[in-house]
Image: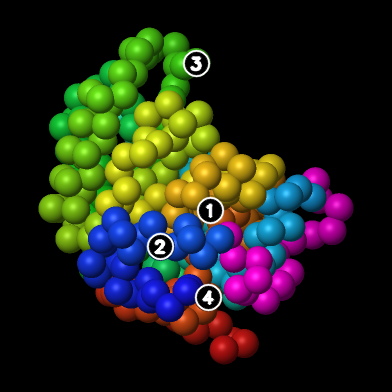
């Protein structure tokens, strides 16, 4: 990690330290190549993203109702090292599998966190109140995630997002998440939303990016990232449908430091 510990970064959350990661490049020379967790030959199209992701050592999944009934013990035993679980959307929608997934992942000893999908036609206060109502504070959970995306095809929300006002709302939601859960939240975003709204801003928050075809720098430049969603059609043991797969920026030691800094307890796999 070019001499910088993610434990230090997570504790201090200084923009200068976070940006130092981008100077390290994207990691191919830093981490040994290994098979992707849950990969089945021929079941997905190889991309630049999946090839590069092999050089990272810590991989996880994100799930919602669309993954059906997940066998979390099998997911953990299959080598997955973390999971993010959809909890809520807007001010009145909860993912029907959230409680089942939230409890199941914890029982399996898998580090897990919750994410909220922002609905831009509800006040930010409604979005946060709904998330807090449905996601109990858990000191052993991963930091919460704010999922910010454009929703141009929404039949119920035609709001045009202006950069300054949208960033103001995002910052307000992130501050409320941190106040309520006691951990610095992570921002999840897509390429189009990043380029139109976030680029050059929010550098004091960890970011979770999506790029399922290309290496991160092709779409996000030198922006440092904490998590990378590099595949959307993975088959993973214990999950009955295709699922998103993600990489953590760092090696095993960095991951352990990140978990410790956030008070997360994990169960070791049989191979450790």
Which label lies toward us, 1 or 2?
A: 2
Residue wearing tag 4: 251
Image coordinates of residue 132 in percent, x first then y, are 20, 46
In the rendered view, tell whether residue 267 sits above or below residue 209.
below
Magenta stretch in the rendered image: 26-45
Looking at the image, tell me whether mark 3 or mark 4 is earlier in sequence order: 3
Relative placement, left or right, of 71 versus 55 is left
- SS of the residue at dot 3? loop
Tell me the tag on residue 176.
none
Task: Mark 3 and mark 4 in contact? Answer it, CB < 8 Å.
Answer: no
Please identify the residue farthest to the front as the structure is shown.
23
Q: Residue at x 43, y 26 (%)?
A: 196
In the rendered view, tell whether residue 152 sits above or below residue 181.
above
Dot 2 alpha-carbon crowd within 10 angstroms: few under 14, some 14 to 19, many 20 or more:
some
- SS of the residue at dot 4? loop
Relative placement, left or right, of 47 versus 222 is right
- Taking the magenta stretch, the answer to whether it contains residue 257 is no
Dot 1 alpha-carbon crowd within 10 angstroms: few under 14, some 14 to 19, many 20 or more:
many
In three-dimensional space, the C-alpha distance between marks 3 and 4, rounded to whole angstroms, equals 38 Å
């Amino acid at each position: 990690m070019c001499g910088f510990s993610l434990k230090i970064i997570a504790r201090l959350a200084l923009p200068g330290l976070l940006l130092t990661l981008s100077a390290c490049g994207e990691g191919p020379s830093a981490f040994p190549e290994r098979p992707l967790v849950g990969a089945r030959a021929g079941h997905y199209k190889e991309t630049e993203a999946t090839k590069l992701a092999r050089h990272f050592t810590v991989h996880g999944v994100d799930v919602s109702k669309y993954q059906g009934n997940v066998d979390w013990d099998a997911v953990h035993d299959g080598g997955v090292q973390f999971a993010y679980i959809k909890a809520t959307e807007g001010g009145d929608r909860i993912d029907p599998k959230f409680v089942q997934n939230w409890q199941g992942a914890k029982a399996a000893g898998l580090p897990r966190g919750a994410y909220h999908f922002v609905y831009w036609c509800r006040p930010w206060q409604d979005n946060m109140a709904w998330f807090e109502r449905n996601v109990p504070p858990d000191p052993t959970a991963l930091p919460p995630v704010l999922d910010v995306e454009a929703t141009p095809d929404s039949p119920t929300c035609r709001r045009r997002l202006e950069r300054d006002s949208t960033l103001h709302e995002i910052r307000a939601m992130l501050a409320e998440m941190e106040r309520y859960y006691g951990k610095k939240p992570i921002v999840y975003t897509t390429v189009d939303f990043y380029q139109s709204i976030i680029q050059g801003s929010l550098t004091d928050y960890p970011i979770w990016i999506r790029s399922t075809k290309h290496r991160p720098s092709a779409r996000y430049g030198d922006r440092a990232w904490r998590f990378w969603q590099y595949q959307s059609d993975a088959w993973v043991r214990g999950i009955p449908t295709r699922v998103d797969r993600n990489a953590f920026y760092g090696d095993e030691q960095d991951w352990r430091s990140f978990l410790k800094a956030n008070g997360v307890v994990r169960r070791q796999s049989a191979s450790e």
